Image (cartoon, helix red, strand yellow):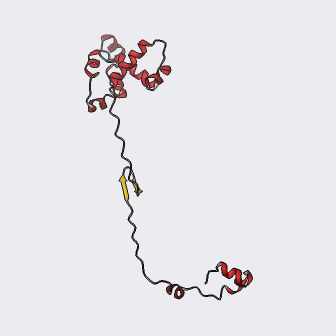
């Protein structure tokens, strides 16, 4: 079926075009006469893919470099810095000190609790530590958990008074 063009509409009028359009032929034999050559086109597109938890695909733009992870923080040095700040500013509380130290208020409380309960010889040994594996293992939560495990009260030794209460 022939597609109407603007010249057909202007010359014949719209009504005549509607009536006669079904008689006109628009088929493959008519289109084949227009094709003179077969063209082959190849598109070269840069294709980048990256595997993470899922497959990521980027066309034409490479993925940006992944940022290097931040080096682990020495928790003992951070706790000593917080304690020095809190002693120098006794009017500060955890909430007002947090933005100045750029540390969350809950972490300030944990660091102070940690530095108060750790033995002094351990603090002296680890405050200058630069080994990344060791610093990774010395997280606040892990040290607090170890402190809680070590400071639990020992079970009472069995005494004659407790033996008599248990046996009766």
Task: Assign the C terminus to one quadrant of the image.
Answer: top left
Task: Assign the N terminus to one quadrant of the image.
Answer: bottom right
146 up-or-down from 133: above or below: above
Locate residue 10, reporting x and y percent.
Answer: 71, 80
Quarter holding residue 131: top left
Of residues 67 and 86, the one nearer the viewer is 67
Of residues 97 and 133, the one nearer the viewer is 97
Locate residue 6, reporting x and y percent.
Answer: 66, 78
In this rendering, does residue 52 appear at all?
yes
157 up-or-down from 9: above or below: above
Which residue is drawn at the image coordinates 30% and 12% (left, top)?
159
Locate residue 79, reporting x and y percent.
Answer: 36, 21
In this rendering, does residue 168 appear at all?
no
Which residue is drawn at the image coordinates 49% and 12% (left, top)?
91
Quarter holding residue 68: top left
Which residue is drawn at the image coordinates 46% and 12% (left, top)?
90
Is 14 displayed left or right of 107 in the figure? right
Is 1 displayed left or right of 13 in the figure? left
Locate residue 153, reporting x and y percent.
Answer: 34, 17
Which residue is drawn at the image coordinates 43% and 82% (left, top)?
37
Count of numbered marks = 0
Quarter holding residue 120: top left
């Amino acid at each position: 079926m022939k597609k109407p063009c603007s010249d057909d509409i202007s010359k014949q009028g719209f009504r005549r075009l509607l009536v006669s359009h079904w008689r006109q032929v628009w088929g493959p034999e008519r289109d084949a006469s227009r094709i003179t050559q077969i063209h082959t086109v190849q598109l070269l597109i840069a294709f980048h893919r990256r595997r993470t938890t899922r497959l990521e695909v980027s066309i034409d733009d490479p993925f940006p470099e992944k940022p290097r992870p931040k080096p682990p923080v020495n928790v003992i040095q951070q706790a000593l810095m917080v304690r020095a700040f809190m002693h120098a500013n006794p009017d500060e509380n955890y909430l007002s000190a947090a933005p100045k130290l750029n540390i969350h208020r809950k972490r300030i409380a944990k660091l102070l609790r940690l530095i108060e309960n750790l033995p002094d010889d351990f603090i002296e040994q680890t405050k200058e530590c630069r080994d990344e594996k060791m610093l990774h293992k010395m997280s606040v939560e892990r040290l607090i958990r170890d402190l809680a495990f070590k400071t639990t009260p020992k079970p009472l030794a069995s005494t004659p008074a407790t033996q008599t209460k248990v046996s009766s």
